[in-house]
Image (cartoon, rainbow, N blue to C red):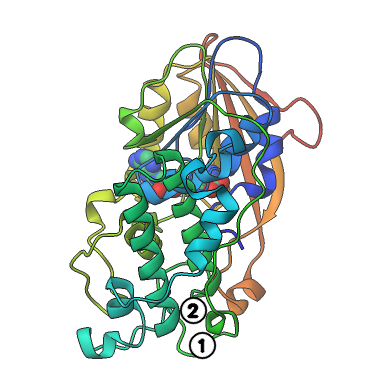
Amino acid sequence: MGVRYIGSKARVAEAIVDLADRAGEGRFVDAFCGTGSVAAVAAERGWGVTVNDSLPSAVCMSVGAIVGRKDVPFTDVGGYHRAVALLNEVEGEPGFLHSQYSPASLQTAGIERRYFTEDNAARLDAMRQRIRMWSGEEVITRAEENLLLADLMQAANSVANISGTYGCFLKNWTTTARKRVALTPRVLPDRSTDIHAVVGDVFALNTTQDDIVYFDPPYTKRQYSAYYHILETLHAGDQPEVGGVTGLRPWQDKASVFCYKVKALEALTRLVLSTRAKKILLSYSNEGHVAKESLINALTEAGHVTVHEIKTIGRYRPNAQASAAGDTVIEYVFEIDPISCGTVTSGADDSEAAYA
Ligand SMILES: C[S@@+](CC[C@H](N)C(=O)[O-])C[C@H]1O[C@@H](n2cnc3c(N)ncnc32)[C@H](O)[C@@H]1O
């Protein structure tokens, strides 16, 4: 099971990449890549891709979603499937996840955190340690390490006792949380891909006038660094000071300006105006902090704006109750052509037209 990610564009990625013009030298830049679902489609269509996110775990997931078989031969461990099998054979060894995110935390932190069973947490600790060892001994390359860490995060997610994010754990164990954690090798595309992976703030990302730049910023107050804190820790393999009921690691240094209602419009405008690109595609939602009309007004300063209503998708729902209460969400893609200035049109066909 892939990681359920707030705002994932997995279901609409094809439609988004359809808006990109493949001609020319430029790259497809997924500047808020998250799980990399959009960049993966672009890579499949032959683009060289740049993925960027402020969270290292997100960039790792994205590279894992894109990498081709030829990029990760796992020569020194006998191939990718053998590497996964070896990790799955590792004996559990209690470490940081076990001490903080399994019921063992009752002893170490005074709170019983039920994110993982003790057995699964100890297995995750041991697998993380094995990947670190292989990397340290140069048995695996950086790209191979990245793929195994992405697989490890997916494996953790499939047995996490949560309802979607790591913002909280469930009181009662789910059936899947009780299953033994194991990595599942993915089907890698039979190609090598030109991937440029960057961990950093989107405002620091370098792009060129030949690039298609895709922005999928957060549009609600939910901070990804807090909601996915355990993936960050699993990816880093570190032992941060954690606290509170959920064992949150320090996350404020990764707080996103786009998650604050009062700052979002200014930040979005500044970002688009300061971006060099052949075309900018910006995803936003009718449930976001900024109203569509305000965005259009601001974006026309940067160029010609076309608004596409790409598809109506279901809201990310953390639980059944929220799901029952949920209504539809409209996802917009604002296509900005920075060359000509100051006009607005609707999308090319009826299914896309959202603004007239
Ligand atoms: C809506 S999600 C992207 C989802 C992605 N398109 C997908 O399909 O999985 C927004 C992402 O933006 C990242 N982010 C938030 N603020 C950022 C910033 N200032 N710079 C870079 N990335 C940021 C978050 O960590 C999160 O992964």
Q: Is residue 309 left or right of residue 340?
A: right
Which amino acid type is shown beneath numbered disc 1?
Answer: Trp
Residue 334's spot in the image, x, y percent? 58, 31
Q: Amino acid at mark 2?
A: Asn
Disc number placed over residue 173 in the picture, else none = 1
Residue 243 percent across, percent down from the top left: 22, 74
Q: Which residue is mark 2?
A: 161
- 198 in relation to 314, above or below: above
Q: Quadrant of the N terminus?
A: bottom right
Residue 257 horizontal side relative to residue 62, left or right: left
- Mark 2 lies on a secondary structure that is loop
What residue sits 32% from the left and 30% below the top?
A: 203
On whether ligand 1 comes within 8 Å of the CB at mark 1, the answer is no
Say if residue 21 shows up in the picture: yes
Gap in angstroms between the C-alphas marked 2 and 1: 6 Å
Nearer to us in this view, 142 or 90: 90
Residue shown at the point (61%, 38%) measured from the top left: 69
What is the x, y in percent for residue 295? Answer: 49, 34
- Residues at circles 2 and 1 in contact by the CB criterion of under 8 Å: yes
Q: Which quarter of the figure has residue 102? A: bottom left
Q: Earlier in the sequence, mark 2 or mark 1?
A: 2
The local crowd at label 2, few if under 14, some if 14 to 19, many if 20 or more residues have their Cα within 10 Å, is many
Regarding residue 285, the answer to whether it shows in the image is: no
